[in-house]
Amino acid sequence: MEILDRVSSIQAEFAQRRFQEIRPVGRLDFFILLKVQGRLILDFADAYPIEASFLRNVRSETDSLQEMIAQRYSIEGLEYYSHMIEQAIGRGELRKDLPVEVMGRLINHVMINLQEFALPRSNFLGTRDEAAITAQLDYLLSLLRSGMRR
């Protein structure tokens, strides 16, 4: 747990600092919030690749371990995304006819594997293309939005 303490602290400090830099304006609906979180995940992976890989592995663990970790750390997981989804349904942003658990598992899986879904090939070749990253993230969220939005 000592390593997780250190990595979680690094991630929390980075997320707080980076969120202030991004500074989204206006009402944060479900998909805008996912985009901001996605950006934080991708930027953290770029700045701290070893720590990000460690957190990704932790977030891929069994549900019981996830619950224990979520109680101790601010690492988003299935419970977090399910709660976000329930709130968005309550605000009328998401469809009511889809099971919250299924949508939560989908979002959790996407966020755990965001680097595979959202990073353009150029990033794997050693160059960071900010416009391409933003476009890829927008495409991914558009796909999710088209199936989940009310």
Image (tube, rainbow, N blue to C red):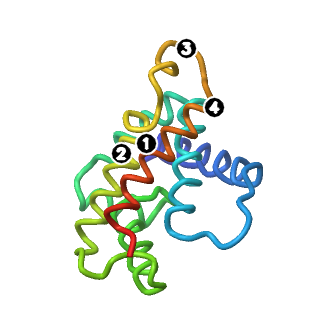
Q: Residues within 10 Å of mark 2 (few under 14, many from 20)?
A: some
> Disc 4 to disc 1, how far (Cα)?
23 Å
Amino acid beneath label 4: Glu
Going from the N terminus, do you reach mark 2 or mark 3 first? 2
Which disc is residue 58 wearing? Answer: 2
Residue at the disc numbered 4: 130
* Kind of residue indicated by mark 3: Gly
Q: Is residue 1 left or right of residue 102?
A: right
Q: Secondary structure at mark 3?
A: loop
Q: Position of residue 73 (x, y in %)?
A: 49, 59
Quadrant including the C terminus: bottom left
The answer to which quarter of the image holds residue 116 is top left
Mark 1: give few (<14), some (14-19) or many (20+) Cα within 10 Å. Answer: some
Which of marks 2 and 4 precedes in the sequence?
2
Depth check, front residue: 102 or 76: 102
Crowding around mark 3 (Cα neighbors within 10 Å: few <14, some 14 to 19, many 20+) is few
Q: Which residue is mark 1?
A: 55
Observer-nearest residue: 47 or 51?
Answer: 47
